[in-house]
Structure formats: C-alpha cells, structure tokens
C-alpha cells in the first residue's frame, strides 16, 4: 500500500539505467537524470540550466509537492524511422508533460500531457498506464524531458517498448487484472450471500475490506480511471490515498469484530483501539482537508501498523483463537508479496510485471484464506450447536428413563420415527432410481451429441474435426508399429460448374453419391473416409503403402466416373481427382506435412487434366515430396 514511502533508499544503484528497454529493439537509451522543483521553469530553461540535475538511482522520489523534472537521451540505431512507447507504470501521478528535444535541428516536439487529473480521452494514448509515443528518424538522437507533478508519492517505473510488445503487454495486463477483479467479485458475492443469511456484521466488514482493496487496485493500476471514472472527477487525484486509507481501516475493523479482540483486553485491545482512532482521523483528513493529510505521516505509520497487526493476530492465535491462525497466514502472505513489491520500487529487484503487480497475488491469496477463516468459523459454530443439541438430547433421554410413565410415549415416538425412516428410505430409493434414469438418458444424449459433432450432416461421413483428431492418432500409431500411413485427398472435378448449372440441391445429391462410393471402399478396421470441406474428401489408410493406395484410389475414381446421375431428365456424369501421399514410419514429418503432400499431389492431378490419380513420393526422413 503506502509502505513504499517508508522504505529506505540505496546509496548507489546496482544498475544505473533505470528505464527498462529490453522490448525496444534498435533504441539506445542513456542514463536518466532528475531535478527537483523548478516547475515554474519552461522546457527551454530546464534544458539550458544544468544545475541540480543528478542521476536517477532508484525509481522513487518520495513526495515532491514542488514537482520534479526527468530527462534521458535516446538514439535510433536502425536504418529506418521507428516508433516506440514510453510507459510510466504509476498512473496516480497528477500531471506528466513530455516533450522531445532534437539537438541536431535545435527544436522541440509537441508537448504531450497525461495524468490522473486529466480525462482519459485527453491522453496521447488511451491506456491504464501513462503512455507516450516516441517517433525517431533513422539514426536520429533526441533527449526526452518529462515535467512531473504529484500530490502523492512520485514513483517512476519507466519502460520503453515497441508497438508489438506494447500491445502484448496491454493484453496481458488486461487479462491479469480481469482475473483479479473477477475473482474478487466472486468472493464479494459469496460473502454478501453469507451476510444475507447469517446477518453477521463480520461479513459486512469483510465485504467493505474487499471493496476497499478493489478500489485501491483499480486506482493504483489505472484501470479504475480507464473504466469507472474516465472523466477525472476533481477528487480523483486523492483516490490513491483514500483507497489506501480504507485498506488500512477496514481490515482493522474486521479484525476487531471477527477475532473478538475486545474480549482479550490488555495491550492487544488498547493498541488496536489507538490504531483504529488514527486511521479514522486519517480518513476524515483525506476527505475534508486533503491538502494537509500528509502531515499525519501515513507512509511512516503504515509499516509499523502492519507489523503490529501481525503481532496482534499471532498473539490471539497463541491464546487459542482458531480463526486467528488463517488470518495470520493470510497477513504474512500479503506482507511477503508487498516486500517484493517494495524491493523492486527501491531498485533492489528488477521492475517487471511480477514484482510490480505481485501484490495482486498476495491480496487474492489473503482474501481466499480469510474467506476460509470465515467458513471455518461457521463450521465451528455449527459443531458447537450440534454439541449443545446432543447435550440436550442426552438430558431428555435421562429424564425419560427416570420417569416410568413416559416409557410408552417414548416407544410410540420410536415407532413413529421408524415409520418415518422407512418412508424416507422408500423415497430415497425412488429418487435414486429416477436420478439413475436421468443419468442414463443424459449419457445417451451425450453419446448422440458426440456422434453428431463428429459427422458431416450432408454426407454422413466423418467431418474434418474427427479426421484431424484421428490423423494425429494414426501418425503416432504408425510410428509406434513401424507401418506406413497413406492419405488420399480427392476433389470432384468442375463441381462449382455443376452447382451453378443445376443448383445446390442437385450438388448436394452429387456429394452424397460420391460419399457413398468412397465409404464402400473403406471397409477395413481403421480406414476412415471424411468430408474435408466443400467438394473435397479425405481418406486415411493405416498400414497401407503407396501402390496399394493408388490402386484403391483408381477403383474409387472409376466408380465415381460410372455414377449415373439424373437432373430433370438430363444425365450428368462426374469425375474426381486424387492426390496420394504416404508417410514413412521413420519420417519425422508432421501430420500437416502429410496433408500438404497429398494436396500438392492433388494439385498435380488437376494440372494434369483431372480425373486421374497422382502419387507423391513417400515422406522420408528429410520430409521431401516428389510426384510419382
């Protein structure tokens, strides 16, 4: 959260180049420098005045109410004009103005402005991060200047990427945060349902904690402004501090209620009460006097608060509070990922997607564990109720044993219970039988759906999906057994002309008749005739060499040629061309290469005048194809 403001800086950076540019090929990036304050100075004055500029050693300038400047040189090493994107992955900065200075022409590029105080539509690139395009001519050198304003912490995780990497990163970030928010919404809805049924205040406080965390992540990641408040309302610049404050206050209230801290008394209760008062004060300050809220030193209280909260939960765990166990584990998990996040922001670890967004993983694991803790408490309370019921039942039975006059009533009650059990057993048997019948019906329906999904509805041959699945299986089986595999690829000659001349219904009849001929010749176990698409058919012949397959293709071709088709009294004849390809069992060619060889053979058959069979040479170890 706000912990990064309390972490110590390093005296010397291990890597002087604080801008990630692995995904910006052809672009040379120099050492970035920064200068504090001087926001009143223009870009020309900032460029000419070298006073105060110093190397950027860590991507974190803490709070800088007077603003800051950042600059770094770039050089296009490519022989053509290229474009890159500068990503500033801390979208809670109020305003960032970027201009590029071209020293050879002694000119400035147009200013580009982004920040959380501006509407998303005013940014140069619409994205959850602050993104600026950078265009350079071949061999061109330039200096990028950024004027930075921030009412919050000034963190500068910078990255230069090309267009392909930018799009891929955007898709990955969107998927990552969609998974996070989707999972969080599921947890919120689950606990809301428990709140409705149990009316327990713990679930309400937990839901508020979840919503605060979602608000914080939405603000820190930039997706909140991108999706929920793109117009940048006046208070949006304070959303980061507000959401972080809520993320400290709501879990504290949840701990007090859920772990029943007050009943333990002592230092545990008193320090929790003091922390609660402090965070309520911070919340009021952020809402009412946001410009003075930083005097409450939230950044420096955050880390001790987390450690004290962990000490409280561990103490309650040691005192026998079962629910504190999962709560402590959840808190330790979040702190672990937060430490990784802080180490990256202070330069001790590389800034990448894992270290920058690792808190998301920690948060999600924490909330899953807390949901488990709530469910565990429900189970504990249920067991306590069952135990109480058992004690009451034993007392009732003892009283019944002591009173002889109740014996007959008890026997009658047992008889009634027996009849009820028998009736219940009868109903259970009937319901089980009905469910079994339904299950059997579903199995039959699923089998029929599977058959329909793998069968071409027009020709009743296998469809392309079934063929693709079977082809890979047959290739593996052939290599395992040391037997060849042959594929015939057939195409009805001039079928489009038949369709255009006699209509699609007659064309469909032609496809059915040709399919029937092919099916008659595929009677061996393992042979498969399938419709490959349109007027194309494909046949797999396991354990069949090229010569045998060519003979079979010739028989099919002759039988198709002999078909007698009639359309309104006119006799129509059809011909078909085949391409034959055989895969040697020692070959390393893929199934698609076998199909490609058959397709080239079919093309050769078409080129040779159609109504013929052309065989491609076996696909040997080198995968070469020669027409026989």
Image: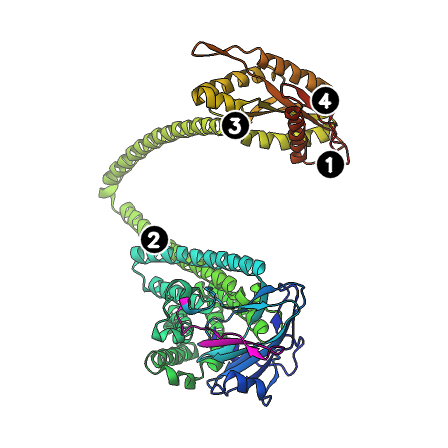
Disc 4 element? helix
Please state which of residues 291 and 46 is positioned toward the viewer in this rendering: 46
Q: Which segment is the magenta one?
A: 95-121
Alpha carbons under labels 4 and 2: distance apart: 83 Å
Mark with earlier residue (2, 3): 2
Please state which of residues 541 and 365 is positioned toward the viewer in this rendering: 541
Mark with earlier residue (1, 3): 3
Disc 2 element? helix
Q: Which residue is mark 4?
A: 546
Q: Which residue is mark 1?
A: 588
| Viewer can see residue 231 | yes
Q: Residue at x 77, y 34 (%)?
A: 621
Mark with earlier residue (4, 3): 3
Q: Nearer the viewer, mark 4 or mark 1?
A: 4
Alpha carbons under labels 1 and 2: distance apart: 74 Å
Disc 3 element? loop
Please identify the quarter of the rendering in which residue 298 is found: bottom left
Please state the total of marks drawn on the protein image: 4
Tell me if mark 2 has few (under 14), some (14-19) or many (20+) residues whose alpha carbon lies within 10 angstroms of its own: few
Asked if the residue under mark 2 is in contact with the one under mark 4, i.e. CB atoms within 8 Å, the reply is no
Tell me if mark 3 has few (under 14), some (14-19) or many (20+) residues whose alpha carbon lies within 10 angstroms of its own: few
Q: Is residue 17 left or right of residue 230?
A: right
Q: Is residue 66 left or right of residue 137?
A: left
Q: Which residue is mark 3?
A: 534
Q: Which residue is mark 2?
A: 391
Q: Nearer the viewer, mark 1 or mark 3?
A: 3
Q: Is residue 375 magenta?
A: no
């Amino acid at each position: 959260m706000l912990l990064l403001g309390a972490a110590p800086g390093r005296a010397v950076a291990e890597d002087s180049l604080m801008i990630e540019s692995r995904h910006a090929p052809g672009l040379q990036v120099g050492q970035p420098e920064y200068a504090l304050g001087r926001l009143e100075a223009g870009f020309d004055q900032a460029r000419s005045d070298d006073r105060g500029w110093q190397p950027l050693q860590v991507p974190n300038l803490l709070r800088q109410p007077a603003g800051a400047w950042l600059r770094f040189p770039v050089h296009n090493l490519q022989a053509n004009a290229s474009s890159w994107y500068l990503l500033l992955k801390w979208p809670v900065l109020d305003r960032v103005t970027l201009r590029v200075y071209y020293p050879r022409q002694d000119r400035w590029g147009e200013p580009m402005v982004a920040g959380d105080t501006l509407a998303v539509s005013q940014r140069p690139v619409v994205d959850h991060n602050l993104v600026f395009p950078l265009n350079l001519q071949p061999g061109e050198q330039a200096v990028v200047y950024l004027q930075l304003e921030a009412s919050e912490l000034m963190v500068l995780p910078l990255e230069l990427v090309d267009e392909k990497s930018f799009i891929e990163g955007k898709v990955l970030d969107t998927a990552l945060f969609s998974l996070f928010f989707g999972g969080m919404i599921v947890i919120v809805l689950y606990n809301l349902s428990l709140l409705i049924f149990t009316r327990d205040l713990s679930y309400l406080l937990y839901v508020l904690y979840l919503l605060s965390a979602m608000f914080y992540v939405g603000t820190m990641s930039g997706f909140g402004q991108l999706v929920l408040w793109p117009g940048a309302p006046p208070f949006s610049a304070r959303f980061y501090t507000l959401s972080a404050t809520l993320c400290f206050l709501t879990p504290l209230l949840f701990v007090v209620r859920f772990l029943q801290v007050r009943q333990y008394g002592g230092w545990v209760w008193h320090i929790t009460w003091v922390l609660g008062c402090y965070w309520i004060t911070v919340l009021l300050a952020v809402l009412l006097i946001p410009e003075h809220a930083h005097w409450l030193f939230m950044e420096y209280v955050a880390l001790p608060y987390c450690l004290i909260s962990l000490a409280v939960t561990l103490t309650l765990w040691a005192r026998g509070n079962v629910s504190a166990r999962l709560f402590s584990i959840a808190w330790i998990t979040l702190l672990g990922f937060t430490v990784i996040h802080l180490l990256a922001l202070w330069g001790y670890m590389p800034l990448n997607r894992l270290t920058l967004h690792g808190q998301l993983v920690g948060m999600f694991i924490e909330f899953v564990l807390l949901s488990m803790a709530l469910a565990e408490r429900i189970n504990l309370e249920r067991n306590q109720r069952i135990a109480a019921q058992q004690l009451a039942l034993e007392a009732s039975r003892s009283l019944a044993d002591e009173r002889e006059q109740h014996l007959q009533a008890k026997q009658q009650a047992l008889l009634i219970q027996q009849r009820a059990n028998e009736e219940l057993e009868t109903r259970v048997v009937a319901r089980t039988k009905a469910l079994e019948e339904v299950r059997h019906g579903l199995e039959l329906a699923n089998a029929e759906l599977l058959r329909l999904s793998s069968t071409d509805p027009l020709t009743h041959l296998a469809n392309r999906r079934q063929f693709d699945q079977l082809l890979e299986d047959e290739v593996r089986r052939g290599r395992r057994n040391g037997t060849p595999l042959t594929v015939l690829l057939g195409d009805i000659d001039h079928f489009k002309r038949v369709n255009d001349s006699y209509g699609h219904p007659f064309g469909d009849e032609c496809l059915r008749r040709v399919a029937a001929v092919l099916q008659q010749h595929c009677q061996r176990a393992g042979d498969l005739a399938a419709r490959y698409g349109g007027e194309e058919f494909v046949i797999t012949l396991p354990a069949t060499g090229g010569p045998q397959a060519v003979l079979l293709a010739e028989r099919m071709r002759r039988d198709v040629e002999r078909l007698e088709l009639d359309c309104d009294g006119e006799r129509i004849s059809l011909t078909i061309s085949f391409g034959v390809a055989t895969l040697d069992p020692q070959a390393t060619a893929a199934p698609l290469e076998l199909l490609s060889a058959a397709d080239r053979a079919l093309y050769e058959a078409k080129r040779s005048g159609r109504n013929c069979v052309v065989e491609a040479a076996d696909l040997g170890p080198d995968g070469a194809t020669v027409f026989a």
